[in-house]
Amino acid sequence: MQFLKFSLIRLVIFFVVFLPLVYFLRWPVFTAGLVGLVFAFALSYLFLNKMRLAASADVQQMFASRGPKKSKHDLDDEEAEDRFLDGNK
């Protein structure tokens, strides 16, 4: 949940910078987008450190739970390889 909240806040910061540059100051879209990205990155890095770390932990936990599951055959095979390698030392 922290990941979505952090992403939404960064997106809001981006649009708060991007939209006035494009519509009021008539900057090119690419330039305004680049400036918006830099501002969103810098402000979130400086002021949202705890939220960024929590979002990172959420993503890490999500991918850790989806990791490849090893079957009993794979575990037995790894154990046999370990015994073989330890016996050759």
Image (cartoon, rainbow, N blue to C red):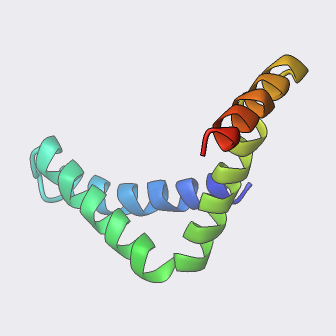
Measured along the vertical axis of the image, is residue 50 above or below residue 16?
below
Kindly identify the residue that appears in the image at 62 percent across and 38 percent down: 88
Residue 23 coordinates in the image, percent (x, y): 22, 50
In terms of depth relative to the viewer, which is nearer, 88 or 48? Answer: 88
* Image coordinates for residue 75, horizontal then vertical, percent: 82, 28
Q: In this orientation, does residue 69 appear?
A: no
Q: What is the residue that sits farthest to the front in this orientation?
A: 88
Choose top left, top right, bottom left or bottom right for residue 67.
top right
Q: Quadrant of the N terminus?
A: bottom right
Q: Residue furthest top?
A: 73
The structure residue drawn at horizontal position 68% and vertical position 43%, both measured from the top left corner, is 86
Is 87 located above or below residue 31 in the figure?
above
Q: Is residue 19 left or right of 7 when viewed as pictured?
A: left
- Against 65, residue 39 (above or below) is below
Foreground: 54 or 25?
Answer: 54
Q: Position of residue 17 (x, y in %)?
A: 30, 62
Residue at screen point 20% across, 60% down: 35
Q: Quadrant of residue 20?
A: bottom left
Residue 31 location in percent, x, y? 12, 50
- Residue 10 visible in the displayed image: yes
Q: Please indicate whether residue 77 sits to the left or right of residue 40 in the image.
A: right
